[in-house]
Amino acid sequence: MTEIAKPIFDEDPFDPFDEGAIEIRVVDRDGVEHRLAALDGFRVMEVIRDWGLPIKAECGGACACGTCHVYVDPEWMDRIPPATDEEMDQLDQIFEVQENSRLACQILTAENLDGLRITLAPGSEVD
Ligand code: FES
């Protein structure tokens, strides 16, 4: 099931995707997929949080907690910049890491990531 995150005002007819927003697709911990509109150059973690989806992201994007752990759909792995040593070190410290694990705070939105699909990983839940 796919849900489109609602704008702040339900009656607002503005469709951000018609206006060139970048689409980030996020599968939450209940398996529901959300289409989130994003601007270029934002952390994917910020996009998720700002649309009100639950993501712990305890350190606020400092690559110091691992609670923004996501699984990137395999077809997107080659399109996002590789993880830095700092991100890899953080991934080494968390559970249930897979080959497609990334930290959402270390992925920046960009035009070439329009349609990026990720799944919130265990450990990203808000307490
Ligand atoms: S928010 Fe803490 S590592 Fe991403």
Image: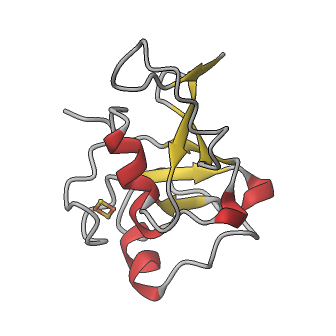
Q: Where does ligand 1 appear, by image quarter? A: bottom left
Viewer-nearest residue: 69 or 110: 110
Which x, y percent locates residue 13? Answer: 52, 20
Viewer-nearest residue: 94 or 74: 74
Which x, y percent locates residue 125? Answer: 32, 36
Q: Would you say residue 124 is visible in this rendering?
A: no
* Residue at left offset 76%, top offset 70%: 78
Q: Would you say residue 52 is visible in this rendering?
A: yes
Residue 40 higher or lower than 118, as above or below:
below
Viewer-nearest residue: 106 or 88: 106
Task: Give the residue furthest to the right.
Answer: 75
* Residue at left offset 25%, top offset 72%: 62
Which x, y percent locates residue 84? Answer: 49, 84
How is the model colour-coded? secondary structure
* Residue at left offset 54%, top offset 78%: 83
Write down the quadrant of residue 119 in the picture: top right
